[in-house]
Amino acid sequence: MAEHFDLVIRGGTCLTPSGRVEADVGVRGGRVAAIGQLGGVDADQVLKAKGQHVLPGVIDSQVHFREPGNEHKEDLESGSRAAVLGGVTAIFEMPNTSPSTTTGKALEDKIDRATGRAWCDFAFFVGAAKENVNRLAGLEQLPGCCGIKIFMGSSTGNLLVRDKRLLREVLKRGRRRIAVHAEDEDRLEQRFDLARDGKQPYCHPLWRDEQTAILATQKILGLVRETGRRIHLLHVTTRQEMALLADHKDLVTVEVTPQHLTLAAPDAYDRLGSLAQMNPPIRDEKHRDGLWQALADGVVDVIGSDHAPHTLEEKAKPYPESPSGMPGVQTLVPVMLDHVNEGRLTLERFVDLTSAGPARIYNIACKGRIALGYDGDFTLVDLKAKKTIENSMMASKCGWTPFDGMKVTGWPTATVIRGNIVMRDGEAQGAQTGQPVRFHDTGGG
C-alpha cells in the first residue's frame, strides 16, 4: 500500500539545512514527514513547485496589527491575511495596542481574538511597564507570548521605559531574550523644536538624529553587560550602532527592516512625504550602506517588517501630527527577493534572516527549517517572476505601501502553514487556522 501524506510539494528546489535540494516534501499531521523523491505516494493534496524554490516558512518577528483599539487601521484578520499573501507563515505582534498588552488577561484576549480569525500562526509580546515589572518573569512564560518588549522612546500608553533604574529592573526579571526599541527619550524631547510648527517630513531624521539612536543603544548595552540579560535590538538604523553591536554579539541580536535597507533620505521624503515617516527614521545612503555592510558581516540576525499601518487620512495630517509607521508584512518577501536578485544577499542568507534566525533567537519550537518533524511551514517563491508592487494589491486596511510602483524580481507564489495551503497565486484560500507559536523555553513549548 502506498505511503499516505496530507500534502506533497512536488519538484521544487528546497532550501534545507543541508543546502539546496531538488526534492519533494511530504507533510503528515502538520509536520514534515518525508523529504526526497516521493514517486507514486498517495496524497490528499499536491502542490506543484517545479521551477520554484521552497523555503522554510518566513517568520515576521515584528508587526503591529492594531487590535484591540485601532481596528480601523488594521486587525488580526486583515494583518494576517496580508502576511500570508506576502508569503509569511507566522508573526510576532507588538504590545502597543489599546489597551496595551501588559497583563496576562490582555495577552489572553489577543490570543482569543486571533483564534479562528488569523490566517497565519501568531505570538504576542508583553510590554514592559512600571506597573508590571514585578510580574514580567511570569508573563514571559505564558503560552502565546514571544517575549517582553521594551520601548525606550516614543511609545504609547504606559509602555515608555526611559529611566535607567527601571530598565535595569526589567532586565533583571525573567530570562528570555527581550526585544528593544532604542531611541533616547530625553534627546527627543530636547530636540522637538526641529519638528514642530510647520516643519516638513524631511525633518524627521534631523529631529530623531543618529545620536538619538546611539545614546539609547549605548545605555541598553551598558545595562546588558551589567545584568547579563540577552536582548534583541529592533530596527537598527545607523552604521555607528552596527559597529558597537559587533562587540556585543554574545548578548545582543540585531534586526533591520526592508524599509531601512531599501529607502534613503532625502529621496524617500521627497517622493513619499509623511508616508516615509517611521521610527527610527529612514536615514541617508551612508547609513543604508552601513546596514548592508553589517548584514554582509553577519552582525544582522533577522529581518522584520515593523509593519505599522496608519490610514492615508491620518498620514495626511501636517507633520509632526502625522503618525510614524508604514505597512510592510506583505512586501517583506518580494522586496528582499529583489535584493537577492540584485546580488546584495544570497537566498540562503535570506532564509537565515527570516526563518532560521527568528527561530534561533526566540527559541521557537519546530519552525524555521525544512527538516523531519518540523512544522510543515513553507514559503514558495518564483525567483524569476517580474512584478510591480501596487497599492491595490495590499490586504492591509490602510490600503497603501511605501513601495507602490516598485518593480521587483522574485515573488511568493504559495504559503503553506502546518500542511495547509493558505495562499496560492495571490489569493488567500482555505480556513483561518492560525495557532499560537510554541517556544522551547516557556510553558507553551
Image (cartoon, rainbow, N blue to C red):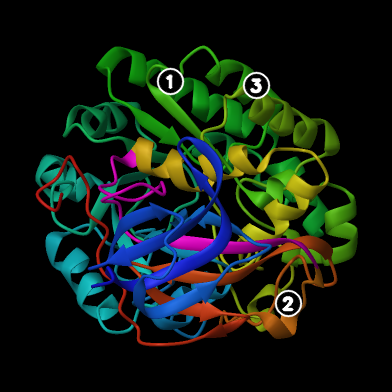
> Is residue 81 in view?
no
State the image coordinates of residue 166 (x, y, percent, origin top left): 27, 33
Residue drawn 57% across and 85% down?
Answer: 427
Judged left or right of residue 61, residue 208 is right
Q: Which mark is residue 175?
A: none
Which numbered disc, 1 or 2, marks the residue closer to the eye?
1
Q: Is disc 3 placed on a helix, strand or loop? A: helix
Q: Give the magenta range.
A: 362-385
Q: Quadrant of residue 361?
A: top left
Residue 188 lies in the magenta-colored region: no
> Is residue 442 in view?
yes
Of the pair 312 and 330, the residue shown nearer to us: 330
Q: Report the residue marked by disc 2.
A: 316
Please identify the residue farthest to the front as the structure is shown: 1
Per the model, the C-alpha gap separating discs 1 and 3 is: 20 Å
- The reply to whether the C-beta atoms of the residues labelled 3 and 2 are less than 8 Å apart is no
Disc 1 residue type (three-letter): Leu
State the image coordinates of residue 269 (x, y, percent, origin top left): 84, 57
Which numbered disc, 1 or 3, marks the residue closer to the eye?
3
Count numbered badges in the picture.
3
Q: Is disc 2 placed on a helix, strand or loop? A: loop
Q: Quadrant of residue 413?
A: bottom right
Judged by its main secondary structure, the magenta piece is loop
Q: Report the residue marked by disc 3.
A: 297
Classify mark 2: residues with Cα within 10 Å, few (<14), some (14-19) or many (20+). some
Classify mark 1: residues with Cα within 10 Å, few (<14), some (14-19) or many (20+). many
Residue 363 lies in the magenta-colored region: yes
Residue 240 vertical position relative to residue 195 in the rendered view, above or below: above
